Amino acid sequence: MKVIVDLNKCNDHGQCVYSAPEVFSLNGRGELSFRDEARDIYVSDQLDESLRDALEEAADICPMQAIEIEG
Amino acid sequence: MAGVVVVGASLGGLRAADALARSGYSGGITLVGDEPHQPYNRPPLSKEALLEAQDFDAIRLRSSAKPGTVSLVTGVRAASVDLGRGLLFLSDGRELAFEGLVAATGLRPRALGIPKPSAGVVVLRTYEDLVRLRSELATVKDVAIIGAGFIGCELAASLTQLGYRVSVIAPENVPMLRPLGEELGAALMRHHLRAGVAFGLERLPVAIEGCERPERVVCNDGSSFEAQLVIEAVGSAANTEWLEGNGLDLSDGILCDERLSFGGDGRFLAVGDVARFPNLAFDAVPRRVEHWGIAVDTGRYAGKALGRLLSSGEVSPAFTPMPAFWSDQFELRIQSFGIPGLVTDASEIRVLEGDLDGEVVVGYHRDGTLVGVVLVGFAQSHMKYRAAVAESLEAAAGASS
Ligand SMILES: Cc1cc2nc3c(=O)[nH]c(=O)nc-3n(C[C@H](O)[C@H](O)[C@H](O)COP(=O)(O)OP(=O)(O)OC[C@H]3O[C@@H](n4cnc5c(N)ncnc54)[C@H](O)[C@@H]3O)c2cc1C
Ligand code: SF4
């Protein structure tokens, strides 16, 4: 399972951080920390299946619908 | 076979249906909505979708249920329901039997009962409303917005950014008074003024004058505002007519208990803007909460709780979410946690960090408990202040038990 974040859609709301703190965090500027790693689309490494519930919650709660779960 | 019917195919209804499907419920889930579309996201209607001329695809909501587990029926209204017999009557003449029901029918905008021309006066709640607003905007220069709540202020910001001359008319003395209090409302108003928004506050519109289209809005103090387009953003009414005749309290949305169930039966739940429920983390007063995040949280809770109840008879713990709300106006991101609107005493509303004319964090206290915070900017401090509200509420609950 991978998580994909469309950083052009993402508006740095940070709601995902409450749902899946293991995966999402904000950097010191209050932006989604994946912005330090990718420009347009962030694709994660393979993530553990135990995170699925939390990631689905994050995808649901993202106001910009920027989070997708693959696999 | 009687499955679960979710009435209202928007954010709250979709999240309830998704969560129920993910819980493994196999009795059949039908999501019924009267709009002609798949579920979509409303917040962009006054912001990105208007500013960036986005089309429907950009605001479509995604479902997290496995394909085929939820059947979506669009363009059909729930006309009435018989809770005792477990039957829903649809506007196309069909009947749906159910063992569980989720009410997610949201709100519709109110319109003022004042004289007005037949064209050029609009509201904003649906995608159709946005399409109409866009086509109206093509021929006008001056826009009057009646109502200074969040939607009115967001529209004022977006339309100013698009180059229109905007006036906001409302009875309060500052915009967003009820949710934010006077000081912060005044600070945000100064920001709008600097950006070119005109305000006509502490007055009520009495007529929208003009032959076929508006020419001006006339107020009770004799003032008037030039406008070829008028947007009414004066609050909303709950869509509960379809539930009448079942002995429910529908005086302001659907009265629910702390588990979001209504009619004294755990198999009937309400979610989103239409649900009036007590959040025991704050107190026992039932309230409707018009927040995007609450529609998601109530939907997810209801789907899970119903799945659990119908498959194992198990009753879920009370629903005690941390309300969160955001609004974008010009370059400002306003973020609230908790229920700032609970506090009306100005001396209990204090700046915690920053200053009112820049980035600021404002705290709202009730009997020494921090019941809400509003941040303008300070993006890096969201987590910290959300946690501060949660801790303060827990400490208060601990002290009183
Ligand atoms: C312009 C705008 C901007 C907003 N911006 C923000 C924001 O920045 N931040 C924020 O937190 N919140 C915002 N909100 C609020 C947020 O969008 C709502 O809280 C959310 O949409 C509530 O979802 P809901 O599913 O409860 O209700 P709704 O979205 O109102 O959906 C109810 C659905 O039920 C349907 N329906 C009604 N009656 C029937 C019937 N009898 N049969 C079948 N279907 C029926 C309706 O047509 C509708 O599709 C905004 C709202 C608007 C309108
Ligand atoms: S919730 Fe969505 S918009 Fe907010 S930071 Fe996470 S991905 Fe970005």
Image (cartoon, helix red, strand yellow):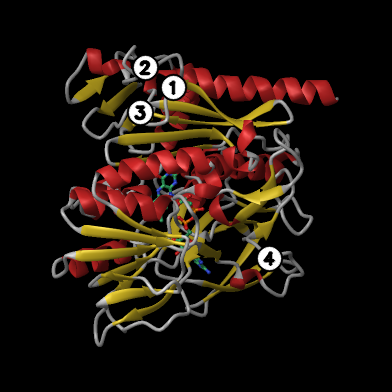
The tag on residue A26 is 2
Q: Residues within 10 Å of mark 2 (few under 14, many from 20)?
A: many
In three-dimensional space, the C-alpha distance between marks 4 and 3, rounded to whole angstroms, equals 42 Å
- Determine whether, in the image, residue B301 is placed left or right of residue B355: right
Say which residue label 1 marks. Answer: A17
Q: How crowded is mark 1: few (under 14 residues within 10 Å), some or many (20 or more)?
A: some
The kind of residue on which mark 2 rests is: Leu
Say which residue label 3 marks. Answer: B358
Q: Earlier in the sequence, mark 4 or mark 3?
A: 4
Q: Do the residues labelled 2 and 1 touch (CB within 8 Å)?
A: yes
Marks 4 and 3 share the same chain: yes
- Disc 3 on helix, strand or loop? loop
Q: Where is residue B324 in the image (x, y as percent from the top left)?
A: 51, 36
Which is in the foreground here, disc 3 or disc 1?
Answer: 3
In three-dimensional space, the C-alpha distance between marks 3 and 1, rounded to whole angstroms, equals 26 Å
Q: Which of marks 2 and 1 is nearer the N terminus?
A: 1
Marks 4 and 1 share the same chain: no
